[in-house]
Amino acid sequence: MQMKHFVFSAFFILTIHTGKAQESLSKDVSYAYLEKLIAVSKANYPKIKMYEARVNTAEYGIRRAKLSYFDIFSFSYLYSPNNNTATISPNFLGGYQFGFFANIGSILQKPSLIKQAKGELAAAQYDKESFDLNMEAEVKKRYFTYVQKVAVLRVRSGAMLDVESMAATIRHRFERGEETLENYNKVLIMIADHTQNILNAESDVLMAKSNLEELLGQKLEDIK
């Protein structure tokens, strides 16, 4: 009966600690720090730089399309010496004849080429904006997961202290012959289970931290 009462008390304490952690989980979240993490990810993540490069390339495409208007026009000249028997008059600028030409077909094509370049720029910008939003959402998700795992570890560590305290009482009672070996072994098993839970929680924290740092490109400890 005493052992049942102990087990019930241990789980009751664990439930209280878990409830408190759930109530205070939002207090562990720093939105100012989260915004800093998002900024760091946008500055470091390689795929974001790839989208920025595409936007820059598209912007260059527009400038190149506009400058290509000069390709429409061409200039040429013909030199004819004074003793040349050609039909060109040698009196015209001392034997030089100049020509200025415009390609009408190119003139008609240029507006559509510029429009196409602007469309490619808009598409590149939309792709970048979409990826930025997805990146921001993913950083938030992984940050919240990391905070949750840290809170779970804190709860389980606190519960472990309570269980160890109660287990010490059972051990003293067992040493005085006031508790059975079976109940004492159950307490040891309970401590082993809590220890395993803490190890699992620590592993979850490390994995959540690693997943978040993957998007940041640097360690959390380096981001203040």
Image: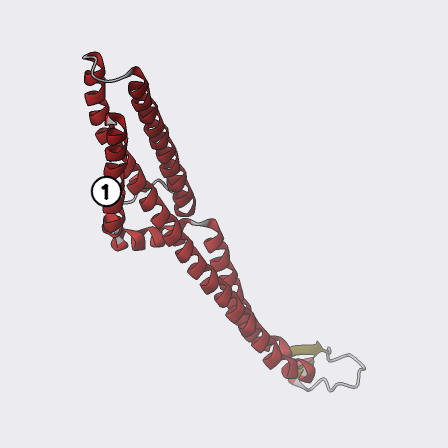
At label 1, counting other C-alpha atoms closer than 10 Å, the crowd grade (few under 14, some 14-19, many 20 or more) is few
* Image height of 191 relative to 117, above or below: above
Residue 116: quarter of image:
bottom right
Image quadrant assignment for residue 163: top left
Query: What's the residue at 25%, 33% (across, down)?
Result: 10
Tell me the residue at 52%/60% (across/down).
54
Q: Which of 127 and 14 is in front in this view?
A: 14
33 is higher (above) or lower (below) than 164: below
Instruction: Indicate the position of residue 25 as horizontal and vertical percent values.
Output: 26, 49
As drawn, 13 above or below 192: below
Question: Residue at label 1?
Answer: 16
Q: Which residue is drawn at 81% across and 82% down?
A: 85
Specify whether residue 67 is in view.
no
x, y (%) of residue 161? Answer: 22, 29
Residue nearest the viewer, comparing 88 with 64 = 64
Single out the residue that lies furthest toward the front. 1
The chosen color scheme is secondary structure
Judging from the image, what secondary structure is the residue with disc 1 in? helix
Q: What residue type is labelled 1?
A: Ile
What residue is rendered at 50% in x and 55% in y? Answer: 50
